[in-house]
Image: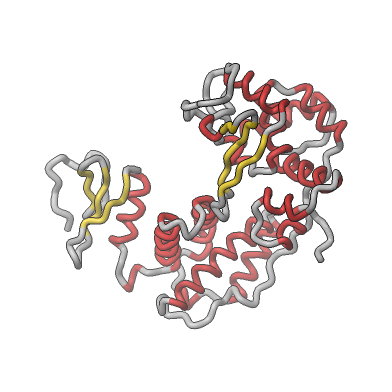
Amino acid sequence: MQKERKDGNPLNLPARCHFKHNAFWYIHAQTGKWENLGADVNKARLKAEHYNRDSATDQAMSWHIDAYLLHFEKLVELQQKAPRTLLDYQNYAKQLKAAFGDLLPEQIQAKQIQAYLTSNQQLGRGVRANREKALLSAVFSWLIANNKGNVSANPCRDIARNQESPQRRYISNEQFQSVRQQAIPAIQLAMDLAYYTLQNPADIIKLRRTAIQTDNDSVYLKFAHPKSGKPLSIALNQQLQDQLKAALGLSDLSSITDSAVILMSRLGKPYTTSGIAAMLHRYQQVAQVNSFGLQDIKIKGALDLIAAGTSIEIVHDLLGHSTMASTQRFLNLPQS
């Protein structure tokens, strides 16, 4: 039984979890070691609850998925894995735990995973189920490598993923411009950044002013690829420089120290991906153009670069894919 706390536990913290020195700490029962769980109460709660279930009877698949995510989080802290991948995995884990969480690892069979892929394909989320299956496979591989979970074979290994046909279409210059003309300046800037930089929409939306760098007469945007973490500097043309000056209310882009995000609404709040998507949809309805998003604009930018004579190797580097085959699949190009 948990000892009654002197403060009455106003944060509803799990057993052995305490707030001290502006951080949450977990006291491990066996070693007495204090582990810093960070300053986020929700994340601290999840970790503490996971540790409190650390017994053989409690280690169903839900527990092992959480354990793998904690392991992956440490790899991110060591800069061996990308933070973006961790966020994706945390989202995929929600559906996996709903489907398989109450089962022990050795109870999960290949036919159940196949049924999961098939049913999700019928629900219109076949591609997402592929990503979730990839995470499940990674968890099983980790369990086997560490002799955990009482499993010796990965049930995901021989299960083919759902077919992924390209859903994106090429946006013509006329379609792009007709929508752009309807948009407010902030959305025009978002469209142009996606087109010229080829970076992920989520990274463009959260781009901060300190990412703007100058060198003599040149202006750059500094990114870090979400998968590899590799730094990338992209030179900006005069049009983008002028748009940034107008958006930020500046006459000079050098020596920016303000770390606020670049894309802000009229109310001074950062945009969200869903918010920009909704605004683009309204503009497309007015322009009578079929719907497209920032990701489609990114693909248009990549294909237009290749059509203009830029080598696919350079486009591959800008996109940040791990392999050339990934770039070719992403752009629906013939694979060499």
Left/right of residue 256 with respect to residue 64 in the rendered view: right
User: At 20% across and 63% down in the image, what residue appears?
Assistant: 29
Left/right of residue 142 with respect to residue 219 in the rendered view: left
Q: How is the image coloured?
A: secondary structure
Q: Nearer the viewer, residue 83 or 8?
A: 83
Locate the C terminus and report the quarter of the image it occupies.
Answer: bottom right
Q: Does 262 sit above or below residue 227?
A: above
Q: Residue furthest front?
A: 216
Locate the N terminus and report the quarter of the image it occupies.
Answer: bottom left
User: At 56% across and 55% down in the image, what residue appears?
Assistant: 228
Q: Residue furthest bottom?
A: 152
Q: Percent x, y for residue 59?
A: 37, 69
Left/right of residue 14 with respect to residue 282 in the rendered view: left
User: At 54% across and 66% down in the image, what residue appears?
Assistant: 136
Q: Percent x, y for residue 266?
A: 58, 18
Q: Does 330 sit above or below residue 190?
A: below
Q: How many marks?
A: 0
Left/right of residue 151 with respect to residue 307 in the rendered view: left
Q: Nearer the viewer, residue 45 or 112?
A: 45
Q: Percent x, y for residue 27?
A: 21, 57
Q: Percent x, y for residue 173?
A: 85, 34
Image quadrant in which you'd find residue 137: bottom right
Q: Nearer the viewer, residue 157 or 227?
A: 227
